[in-house]
């Protein structure tokens, strides 16, 4: 267990430097911050600046120390998970990136490291919110892919070699050697473009080849599924009283399927969000307010947990548990999937429960309402989609189901043939 504490450097002078000390596995590592404070204004017990009028920037300093302590523990835990020895140099390099002591790195991998290290303290320019855990995980994944490629590439990967030749070699390696799917390759390339755009904006990248049309990968439509109203009821009626884990996972998933909210929102519903027969809250991702009527199934689940959503579990665990729930509930319809992987087109048949994830709940909500004739614009008000294109990507109806929807209108409009006497 690592201890992370703050102290004042024992030097002469009216103000002293605040430094961080890490004690881990018998090692003592110091890291000096850019902050100075008078000893009389330092609280040794709390290891923070005292709340005194004389220190006008005390909140800024204490806030920075909070973030630095949190980041240090994160770095220590990541080093342990990766099997990397925790050294003074290792910690200093990463904390320098986090605190921007080194300015903007002018090589690709150091720049990516800075993007990752500063993600928890930055906000998304589009939403104004902090960078999500999923986005940071994607950054790390793409960095690792690039590092793996560099091991077999004939050149060191840096800004100045990212051109047409690099791109075709990189895509070929991901396709043939790594056997990545087409959509996975596209996500990796798009993330690399994000890094390069940021580096260009910072003035450390001058190579613009990545902005050309060739620097893209064609995508293919994913075989997304949804659960019909009858399948959701089938899951609801399945008895999981013998397993608190599966019972709670089932209820959490159904809250998502009854509201159309994202995982971060449907797992955060509290009693204060419930206004008579509606749920009113601001979405975490966009900040937009949504008002969702409470369906009978949702009301029963909320009552079961004293007016709130079931206690939350991680997205990863819920994804794992809900597959087990659906399998036990008999959601076993065979589904044919097609995917391009390693440059080859494959067809596989899996049971439907294998394709269910937390995101299926949101897709099911939108698809069932659409199938039952609810106007797209009204559904979008509930799901929070801002464009019809984004919304329609959530509709998972089959060709037969679309045909049935059209057929249901034939008797209601001018296309119908009236019987004459």
Image (cartoon, helix red, strand yellow):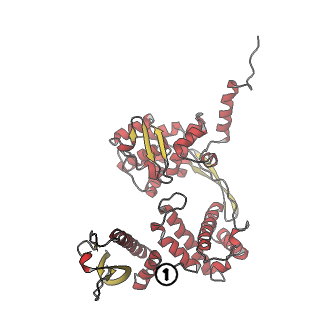
Q: Quadrant of the C terminus?
A: top right
Out of 411 and 223, give the one closest to the viewer. Answer: 411
Out of 269 and 121, give the one closest to the viewer. Answer: 121
Within 10 Å of disc 1 (Cα), the crowding (few <14, some 14-19, many 20+) is few
Residue 279 in the image: above or below residue 49: above
Residue 418: give x, y in percent of width and height: 74, 18
Q: Does any portion of residue 232 appear in the rendered image? A: yes
Residue 16 falls in which quadrant of the image? bottom left
Residue 318: give x, y in percent of width and height: 44, 53
Residue 230: give x, y in percent of width and height: 52, 36
Q: Is residue 96 left or right of residue 368?
A: left
Q: Does any portion of residue 328 appear in the rendered image? A: no
Out of 74 and 364, give the one closest to the viewer. Answer: 74
Residue 335 in the image: above or below residue 45: above
Q: Residue furthest front?
A: 54
Q: Name the residue rendered at 51%, 53% in the picture.
A: 286
Q: Name the residue rendered at 43%, 41% in the picture.
A: 279
Q: How many marks?
A: 1
Residue 57: give x, y in percent of width and height: 35, 71
Q: Which residue is mark 1?
A: 102
Secondary structure under the numbered disc 1 in the rendered image: loop
Q: Residue furthest top?
A: 421
Residue 28 in the image: above or below residue 255: below
Q: Quadrant of the N terminus?
A: bottom left
Q: Is residue 10 left or right of residue 158?
A: left
Q: Name the residue rendered at 28%, 69% in the picture.
A: 53
Residue 45 falls in which quadrant of the image? bottom left
Residue 227 falls in which quadrant of the image? top right
Out of 117 and 230, give the one closest to the viewer. Answer: 117
Q: Residue furthest bottom?
A: 12
């Amino acid at each position: 267990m690592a201890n992370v504490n703050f102290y004042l450097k024992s030097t002469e002078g009216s103000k002293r430097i605040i430094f961080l000390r890490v004690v881990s596995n018998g090692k003592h590592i110091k890291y000096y911050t850019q902050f100075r404070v008078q000893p009389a204004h330092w609280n040794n017990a709390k290891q923070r600046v005292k709340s005194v009028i004389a220190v006008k920037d005390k909140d800024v300093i204490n806030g920075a120390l909070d973030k630095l302590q949190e980041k240090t523990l994160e770095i220590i835990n990541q080093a342990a998970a990766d099997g990397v020895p925790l050294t003074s140099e290792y910690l200093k390099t990463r904390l320098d990136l986090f605190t921007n002591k080194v300015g903007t790195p002018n090589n690709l991998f150091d720049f990516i490291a800075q993007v990752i290290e500063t993600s928890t303290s930055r906000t998304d320019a589009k939403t104004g919110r902090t960078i999500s855990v999923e986005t940071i995980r994607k950054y790390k994944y793409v960095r690792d892919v690039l590092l793996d490629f560099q091991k077999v590439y004939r050149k060191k990967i840096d800004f100045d070699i990212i051109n047409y030749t690099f791109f075709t070699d990189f895509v070929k390696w991901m396709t043939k050697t790594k056997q990545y799917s087409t959509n996975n390759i596209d996500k990796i390339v798009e993330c690399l473009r994000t890094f390069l755009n940021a580096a260009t904006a910072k003035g450390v990248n001058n190579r613009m080849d990545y902005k050309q049309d060739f620097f893209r990968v064609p995508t293919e439509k994913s075989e997304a599924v949804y659960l019909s109203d009858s399948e959701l009821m089938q899951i609801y009626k399945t008895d999981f009283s013998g397993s608190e884990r599966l019972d709670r996972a089932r209820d959490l998933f159904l809250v998502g399927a009854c509201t159309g909210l994202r995982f971060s929102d449907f797992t955060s519903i509290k009693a204060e969000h419930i206004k008579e027969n509606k749920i009113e809250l601001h979405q975490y991702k966009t900040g937009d307010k949504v008002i969702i009527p409470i369906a009978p199934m949702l009301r029963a689940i909320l009552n079961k947990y004293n007016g709130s959503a079931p206690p939350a579990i991680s997205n990863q665990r819920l994804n794992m548990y809900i597959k087990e729930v659906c399998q036990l509930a008999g959601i076993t319809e065979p589904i044919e999937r097609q995917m391009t992987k390693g440059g080859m087109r494959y067809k596989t048949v899996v049971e439907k429960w294998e394709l269910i994830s937390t995101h299926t709940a949101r897709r099911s909500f939108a698809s069932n309402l659409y199938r039952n004739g609810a106007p797209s614009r009204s559904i979008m008000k509930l799901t929070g989609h801002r464009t019809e294109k984004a919304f329609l990507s959530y509709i998972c109806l089959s060709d037969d189901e679309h045909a049935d929807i059209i057929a249901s209108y034939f008797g209601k409009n001018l296309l119908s043939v009236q019987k004459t006497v």
